[in-house]
Image (cartoon, grey):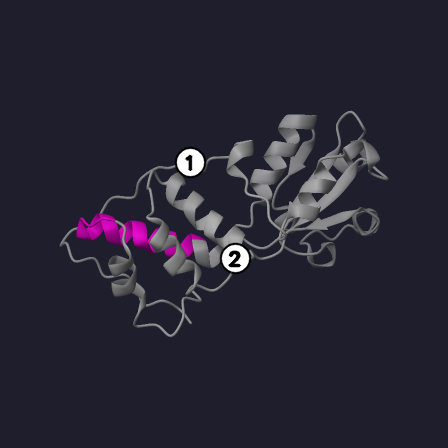
Amino acid sequence: MTVLPLLPLTPQPPLPLDWQPRLGEADFFISDANRAAVDWLARPAAWPMPRVLLIGPEASGKTHLASLFAARTGARIIDEADTRPDGEPMFHAWNAASAVRPLLLAARRLPRGWAHRLPDLASRLAATPLITLSEPDDALLAAVLTKRFADRGLKAPPELVQWLSLRIERSFAAAARAVALLDEAALAQRRELSVPLARALFDTQLDLGL
C-alpha cells in the first residue's frame, strides 16, 4: 500500500540536503541475502571467465558491492546495464575483459529484459556467470535502515529501527523511502527521530509497502 503524502507541520518545507552514501568495506552488511554474491566476487581467479553479471532489486547494494570489487581488483564496472539502449560499449567491454581487468555488469533485470538490441551481445550475456542479490532478510533490513539513516548524518534509535523493520515491506526500496520520509518529517516538524514520529506518519496505513 502506498504511504500517504507527507504533510509537514511547518509553513515552509525544509530544503533538501546533499548527502553521500558511505561505500566502505565496513559499511556493507553481509547476510544470507547477499552472501553468495559476496563469496563469488571474493575469488575472481576461480571464475570460468573474467566477466560476471550482478543482478539485484532497486537499492539492494549493487553499486556499493561493485565499487568494493573494483577497488580490490581494478575491474571495469558498468552500472544500470539493463537500461542502456546502446549495446556497443558493453559489447566491446565484454570482449576486452581479462583476468587483469575483469568486467562486472550490474542491473536490476535479467539479460533477456535489457534495453539493447544487439544479438551478439545477447548471446555473450547468456553465457556469462550470473550472481544475484535478494531482497533483505530481517538482519539485513535492520542494517540497511541503520545505514541509510547514518548516510544522512542521522543516528536512529534502535527501537525505531526495530519498529520499522516489523512494519515496512521487506524490500530495499521500502527501506529507502521510509528513511527519506522520516528524515523529511523530522526536519519539517523540528523533532527527533523516534517511534512516536514514525507512528504519526505511518500508523494510518495497513502496512508500509511504500
Reading the image, the residue beneath label 2 is 138
Q: Amino acid at mark 1?
A: Gln
CA neighbours of label 1 inside 10 A, class few (<14), some (14 to 19), many (20+) = few
- Above or below, 79 against 99 in this view is below
86 or 182: nearer the eye?
182
**Most extreme residue toward the left, as rendered?**
11
Is residue 87 visible in this depiction of the protein? Answer: no
Bounds of the magenta span? 176-192
Reading the image, the residue beneath label 1 is 20
Specify the quadrant of the image occupied by residue 198.
bottom left
CA neighbours of label 2 inside 10 A, class few (<14), some (14 to 19), many (20+) = some
- Above or below, 21 against 82 in this view is above
Q: Give left or right: position of 197 versus 174.
A: left
Picture disc at residue 145: none
Magenta span: helix, strand or loop, mainly?
Answer: helix
85 or 66: nearer the eye?
66
Specify the quadrant of the image occupied by residue 1.
bottom left
Q: SS at mark 2?
A: helix
Is residue 206 visible in this depiction of the protein? Answer: yes
